[in-house]
Amino acid sequence: MHVPDGFIDAPVSAAAGVVAAGAVAVSLRGARRELDERTAPLAGLVAAFIFAVQMLNFPVAAGTSGHLLGGALAAILVGPYTGVLCIAVVLLLQGVLFADGGLTALGVNITVMGVVTALVAYALFRGLLKVLPRKRRSVTVASFVAALVSVPASAAAFVLVYALGGTTEVPLGTVFTAMVGVHTLIGIGEAAITAATVGAVIAVRPDLVHGARGLTTPLKLRVGGELVDAEPAVIEGPVRSPRKVWIAGLVASLVLAGFVSFYASASPDGLEKVAADKGFDKGAENREHASADSPLADYGVKDVDNARLSGGLAGVIGVGATVLVGTGVFVVVRRRRGSEASGTVASEGARTPESV
Amino acid sequence: MGAGHAHKLYVRGSSPVHALPPHCKLAAVLCFVVVVVSTPREAVWAFGLYAVLIGAVAALARIPAGFLLKRLLFEVPFVAFAVLLPFVAQGERTEVLGLSLSVNGLWGAWNILAKGTLGVAASVLLAATTELRQLLLGLQRLKLPPLLVQIASFMIRYGDVISDELRRMRIARESRGFEARGVRHWGVLAKTAGALFIRSYERGERVHLAMVSRGYAGSMPVIDEVTASRAQWSYALALPAAALLVCLLGWFL
């Protein structure tokens, strides 16, 4: 799925590069909070893990096999910031060292395969955890759904980028249907493996799973035959406020509604396409496409076959809106979590001199 | 880890291209690819000239042509997409060997093939002439955040270790008669991934402790400071400058 050079025109690649750079900068700050000063070695090794796990082929059916993309897995296991960071580093090194994915398309690749997958997966995962009962099984279920949605979401984000800066005039509806359709299938494999992997890690080291941090049962001491709560070693278990649950539910429903609507919009678009094929005259002249590489060309193209693109565009705008809203909610949640985190950091800071 | 960290694409050598400072090469490759991507696709001859430029650099770096061509196979997946394009794209159709193909699709396929191949060729040349450590230093010199460079360097240093761990797990599975044949075996593979994650994470913690005990305080010491002279910069930037000339000709002719 790595986008090569020349697939997306230069201005949009540059814009995606800016988005990716911003996301990486935010992730660098956030990862420091998730991993404190262990960021460099831990994130590095998690990136190496993702790099390795992408080589883990799983058989799908009849001789074909797929491999993990790892965005959802990383976000759930080590947190969204570290996840984005790790995927970004993997993509950067794949681009520079292995010539896998174009250098100019690096921004597109990081945005589409790293930022979108990790954000969508983590927002959905968090939202589902708020709704589902607080059990380990819920973590597995939530990671299944998160991974399942994250892959087609990434494909939809790619279509959005393609709509803005694609260098070929394949109708958007076709691209959208093909990309999201294929990636829904890939998503099923990704989801099964991600959920099982998260389940396997939870079974052995539940403390390592970032997404399951609130789930550890508090330690009990048996004092004189009855169970007493042990002194909490670290302040854990975030305060559950109804507002958080509400926000999470909103995110989950938004993302789900978004996706249901994509499918609803995709099939009439297919019909529309057929109808357009039957009665469509060859209005597109060669002259017009001579400037197809210029940034403004696609707006012109959009005007030409607007009727056909509208279905795809609606879906794309839906994705954009969903991603925007998801990000907005995510930022709000993060700020709240950030203040909590700084609280614990402060208390740890107060404790450190004693322990040293 | 005793074998050093030379990656598979690196070709040992002492050519002038090998000797250039890494950040000059990185900047040159990036500029070159940007120029190639912004060339109009109708200027077919321009892409030929780019290929000649790449060939000249490869000859200067004494990279065997066979090596370069073999590494170009990386782009095979998107070649498949490019081949599909003439069939699915819209607009004016033309007859080629009895097949009805879209003119736009043909141009699009050519566009992706030409630009993608040139991009991959430039990346392969960069990777073939630059050592890993040098490449990371170059990224740092290009003002990539130091933390990011550290993460990347850890990923590279431990990438082989972690991959080997995965390989050993696979051998262990296979020596017990396991063969992943279908969906029913996904659970085993997922447990492998889970175990690999725990091993990687715990190794990361140990590495961090080892670093802290050796006085790590958030940044790695830079031992070999690479600097580039003006001559080296102009030498490295000759490639994108020539490409820019071709590109401008492509736009105005």
Image: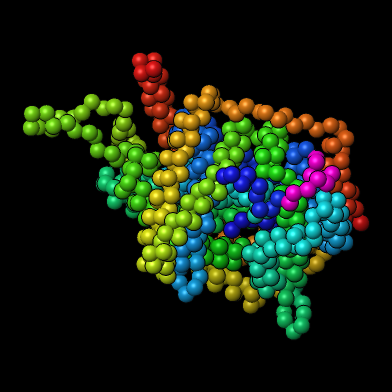
Residue A189 quadrant: bottom left
Give the quarter of the figure containing the N terminus of chain A: bottom right
Task: Please state, as top left, top right, bottom left or bottom right, where the C terminus of chain A lies in the image.
Answer: top left
Q: How many marks?
A: 0
Q: At which x and y percent is residue B245?
A: 89, 49
Instruction: Indicate left or right for A130 with B28 as reference.
Output: left
Image quadrant assignment for residue B157? top right
> Relative to B86, is A111 on the left or the right?
left
Looking at the image, the residue that sits furthest to the bottom is B98
**From where the camera sits, is residue A164 visible?**
no
Return the x and y of residue A102 as percentages of the image width and height: 68, 52
Q: Residue at x 59, y 71 (%)?
A: A273
Residue B98 belongs to magenta span = no
Magenta extent: B11-20
Residue at x 59%, y 35% (from the top left corner): B150
Name above or below for residue A30 compared with residue B116: above
